Amino acid sequence: MTEFKSILGILSGGLIVLMTYAAAPPTPNADTRRASSSSVQDRLTKAANDNLKTNHFLFTDSTDGWTASPGLYDYSFAADTGITMVNYPSYFTPAQILNIAEKFIAAKNASGEFPICLKKTGAAEVYYSAWDLLHHHATGDGAFYVPQMEYLYYQKTGNKSAFLKDAAAMKTALLAVPVNEGNGLVQVLAGDQWVPWGFQDMVRKTGDDLMGSVLYYQASIDMVLLYKAVGDAQDAALFAARAGRIRASLSELWDSGTGMFYAATGQNKQIDIEGSAYAVFVGAANATQITAISTYLVNNYDKLTMKGYMRESSTDWAQCYYIHGGACSFGPGQYDNGAWSVANGWIAYTLAKTKPSLAVKFITDFANSTDPTQEYWAWTGAKPPLSGQTTNLESPSGALSYVRGNARLFSSSTTGAEHH
C-alpha cells in the first residue's frame, strides 16, 4: 500500500501473530539497478492522473465516481476503484472514498451481499460475474474491498462514525463469503461457479482458493483495526481469528517444489503468481514462503514478464469460462493467459525482497511501456496479437504506489536497462 502500515500483534487461536505488510524493501546493494526516480514517477503520475480524469463521472446525486474503463466497463467496480484508492490515496478526498464505500453498502441485496459494480444512479448493476450462471453467492469483490476503503477513510480522517454506522453491513457481507469450515480458507465447491475475485472470474477454480483467501485476510485485518478503533473487542477478536486461521492454513496451498502458492486445491491447481505476490504484500505468507516466492519470481523473471507486465500463472490456465467448459479458448497467451498490470505493486514489492534491482527494472519497464493504462498484453504466440483495453482504471496505480514509496531504490545516476 502507498501509506505503509503495521499490524499490531493479533490474538488468534491463543497465539500472538505479528503481521506487517508493505514495509520497506531490503536496502539496495551494489547490484541495485538505478533509474531516474523523477522520470519514472512523473510518467506514472501523469498516466494515473489523466486516466482518473478520463474515467471520472458523476453519480446522479452529483457525487464522484470512476468507471473501470469507459465504454467497456462503464460502471463503478468495487475492485477497480478500491485497488486504485488504496494504491493512490492522496488523489482522493475522504468524502470521495466514503461515498463509494457506502454506495456499495446501500446497494446490498436481500442476503446482505454487496454488488460487483454500481450503475451511475448508485443502484447495483450486478452481483454476480457474467461467468457465474448459478448465482449462489455474490462475487467477492464488494465484501473484500469495501472494508479496505472504509479503513482508508478512517486513516485519512480518524472519524469513527462512518464505521460505527457501516460495520454491521460489512460484517454480514464478509460472513456470507463461502469458507472451508475445516481450515478457514475461502472455498469454491466443486460444480459451483462462484467467483471470489472478479479479475480472475474466467479462471474456473474449485476447492480452497488462494486469491479469495488472501483478500479475505486483508479485509479481516482492516476490520480488526476498525473494530479496535471503536472499542469493539468481541468483533475485533472474531476477525482476528479469521485472519489467523487463513494465515495458518495457507500452507495447504503451498507447492514446495516451486516455492509458490497454488491458485486452488481443486481445479486449476497450478501456480498463482498474483495471489502469491499478494500473500507476500499483505503479510499472509510466512518468512520462508516470502523468500521462496521472491526467489522464484527473480529466477523466472524473463519467462513471466512482458513490458513490465506479469503473467497470472507460469503456464496457461487449465480451465476457463464456465465450470463445465474447456481450457481458455482465446488462443495461446491471450487474456487470462497473458501478462497483466493489476498486481504490479505486489510483484515489485515481492521481487525486492531478494533483488531490489529487478523490482526497479520491472516498474521502469512498465512506466516506459506503450501505455501504462493498458490492462494486459497477450503472451507470445497469440494470434492475432491481442492487448487489453487502455484507460483501465487501476492499471498504473500499483506501479505508481511502489515508486512513490521506494524512491530510494531509484537514482538518477544510471538509466540504462539491465540484462537479467
Image (cartoon, helix red, strand yellow):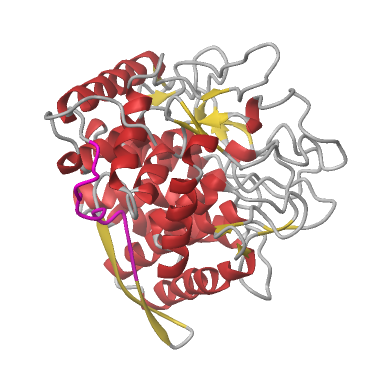
Q: Residue furthest left?
A: 413
Residue 73 x/y as whole percent:
56, 21
Left or right of 172: which side holds 359?
A: left
As drawn, 110 above or below 49: below
The quadrant in which residue 361 appears is top left
As drawn, 122 above or below 349: above
As drawn, 338 above or below 168: above
Residue 131 x/y as whole percent:
74, 34
Q: Nearest the camera: 374 or 238?
A: 374
Q: Main secondary structure of the magenta part?
A: loop
Residue 155 x/y as whole percent:
24, 52
The quadrant in which residue 412 appears is top left
As drawn, 332 above or below 199: above
Q: Nearest the camera: 164 or 287?
A: 287
Left or right of 28: which side holds 18?
A: right
Q: Residue furthest right?
A: 324
**Residue occupying the point 55% across, 60% down:** 259
**27 inside magenta stretch:** yes
Residue 7 seen in render: yes
**Residue occupying the point 63% across, 69% down:** 252
Residue 96 seen in render: no
Image quarter of the C terminus: top left
Left or right of 206: which side holds 399?
A: left
Residue 149 x/y as whole percent:
37, 45
* Label total for image: 0
Left or right of 299: which side holds 380?
A: right
**137 inside magenta stretch:** no
The quadrant in which residue 160 appears is bottom left
**Residue occupying the point 33% across, 41% down:** 359
**What range of the chain is rendered magenta?**
19-33
Q: Nearest the camera: 220 or 412?
A: 412
